Amino acid sequence: MSKTKIPAKLKADVLIRDGYQCLWCNRGPADGVTLHIDHVHPECFGGSTTIDNLGTLCSKCNLGKGAEYYGDYLLSTIFKVQNIWDKIITITKN
């Protein structure tokens, strides 16, 4: 499956919403990390490229978690991503 290119405007909107910090470790550019915009519900599991399914992760956290979206990452994004429970319920039913 090929990855969808996330438009620059959408990336900027996610960064602003997340305060330019990794949702997992809370580090940002001032800490010397590179930030990535990541799908909370991965594309490989049917996730969409929309602001309510994107979150900010630093490169270390993003590359370390791979396509997994349960666990710590989910817990750290649950209050920032709208309708996350609807996405989880949909996935677990399929």
Image (cartoon, rainbow, N blue to C red):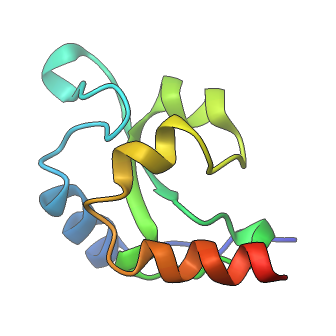
Up/down of 49 relative to 65, above or below: below
Q: Quadrant of the C terminus?
A: bottom right
Camera-side residue of 3 and 72: 72
The residue that appears at 31% across and 37% down in the rendered structure is: 22
In the rendering, at what x and y percent does residue 77 appear? 36, 53
Indicate the position of residue 67 as horizontal and vertical percent values. 72, 49
| Quarter occupied by residue 65 | top right
Q: Residue at x 36, y 31 (%)?
A: 34
Which residue appears at 21% of the width and 29% of the height?
28
Above or below, 77 against 42 in this view is: above
Across and down, in percent, residue 12 comes to: 23, 65
Q: Quadrant of the N terminus?
A: bottom right
Q: Is residue 83 above or below residue 20?
A: below
Identify the residue at horizontal 79%, vertical 67% (top origin).
Answer: 44
Residue farthest toward the top in the current orientation of the protein: 31
Q: Residue 88 appears at what percent x and percent y?
A: 60, 71
Looking at the image, which is closer to me, 92 or 14? 92
Residue 33 in which image quadrant:
top left
| Horizontal side, residue 22 vs residue 72: left or right | left
- Vertical order, 43 against 74 (above or below): below
Q: How many marks?
A: 0
